[in-house]
């Protein structure tokens, strides 16, 4: 069974810092890995989707990388802003159709 | 365009009552998923629908849970004889084809509280 772990569980940084969120998974036979953002009391917003054949994806200030062999993905956020404060979730898709989620990293960016 | 919508946004019910949660997927999406997000448990998969194929119910936690999808669009998740451990946020997602390259788009969720 796929186990997805996110470290750290919580992170607080001052505005303007670059930061890295980590995601690890035990079963490297994934089809894709997806990063989401969740604001308090809200649903999930998809940020980036990396297919198993890809190494990274970029969208604006966000860059996600994937290393299947080591079972790791990272989400890099450049020049963080208070509006980036949210919980960030990674999810891996193995066989079947269900995403396997980590428990998230709660990010607080202080002005 | 419109995203995934869910109703109600909040539901409070007494233990033992039945509840129905509704999901409207993105127009044109053939695949629909239900997940549950419990405090301390993270997100877990419940059920998957794709077109007219038989649903994948492997994530349903008990036979009190059922779901249907009418006309290949709207889906209803029903929980019978609710228990306090059913309290959670129920999230619906849809994707274009349900293929393994697909991105899943999530709705805002229904927060269920069983008293």
Image (cartoon, rainbow, N blue to C red):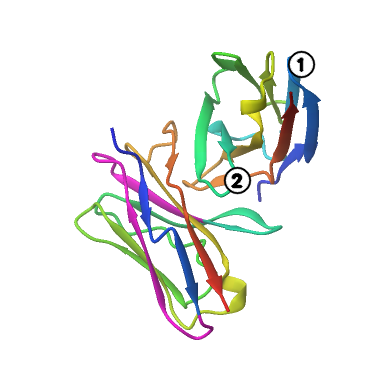
In this rendering, would B53 be left or right of A26?
left
For residue B112, above or below residue A47 = below
Image quadrant holding the C terminus of chain B, namely bottom right
Q: Position of residue B48 (x, y in %)?
A: 41, 54
The residue at 56%/71% (across/down) is B86
Instruction: Please state which of residues A82 and A73 is positioned toward the viewer in this rendering.
Output: A82
- Chain of the residue under label 2: A
The answer to whether the residue labelled 1 contacts the one labelled 2, judged by CB atoms less than 8 Å apart, is no
The residue at 58%/35% (across/down) is A37
Residue B86 appears in the picture as rendered: yes
Q: Report helix, strand or loop for mark 1.
A: loop
The residue that disc 1 covers is: A17
For residue B36, above or below residue A5 = below
Please tell me whether residue B27 belongs to the stretch shown in magenta. yes
Q: Position of residue B107 (x, y in %)?
A: 42, 46
Please tell me whether residue B85 belongs to the stretch shown in magenta. no
Instruction: Please state which of residues A10 and A101 is positioned toward the viewer in this rendering.
Output: A10
Which segment is the magenta one?
Answer: B14-35
Which image quadrant is residue A40 in?
A: top right
Which image quadrant is residue B40 in?
A: bottom right
Q: Position of residue A26 (x, y in %)?
A: 72, 40
The residue that disc 2 covers is: A40
């Amino acid at each position: 069974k796929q186990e997805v772990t996110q470290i750290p569980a919580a992170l607080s940084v001052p505005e303007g810092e670059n930061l890295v969120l980590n995601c690890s998974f035990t079963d490297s036979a994934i089809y894709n890995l997806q990063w989401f953002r969740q604001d308090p009391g809200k649903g999930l917003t998809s940020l980036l989707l990396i297919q198993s054949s890809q190494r990274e994806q970029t969208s604006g200030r966000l860059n996600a990388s994937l290393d299947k062999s080591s079972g790791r993905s990272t989400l890099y956020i450049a020049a963080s802003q208070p509006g980036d404060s949210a919980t960030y979730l990674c999810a891996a898709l193995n066989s079947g159709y269900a995403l396997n989620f980590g428990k998230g990293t709660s990010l607080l960016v202080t002005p | 365009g419109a995203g995934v919508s869910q109703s109600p946004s909040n539901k409070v019910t007494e233990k033992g009552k039945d509840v129905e949660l509704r999901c409207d997927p993105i127009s044109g999406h053939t695949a629909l998923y239900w997940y549950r997000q419990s405090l301390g448990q993270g997100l877990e998969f419940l059920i998957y629908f794709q077109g007219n194929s038989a649903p994948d119910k492997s994530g349903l936690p008990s036979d009190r849970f059922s779901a249907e999808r009418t006309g290949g669009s709207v889906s209803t998740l029903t929980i019978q004889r609710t228990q306090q451990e059913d309290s959670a946020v129920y999230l619906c997602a849809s994707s274009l084809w349900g293929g393994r390259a697909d991105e899943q788009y999530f709705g805002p969720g229904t927060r269920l509280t069983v008293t």
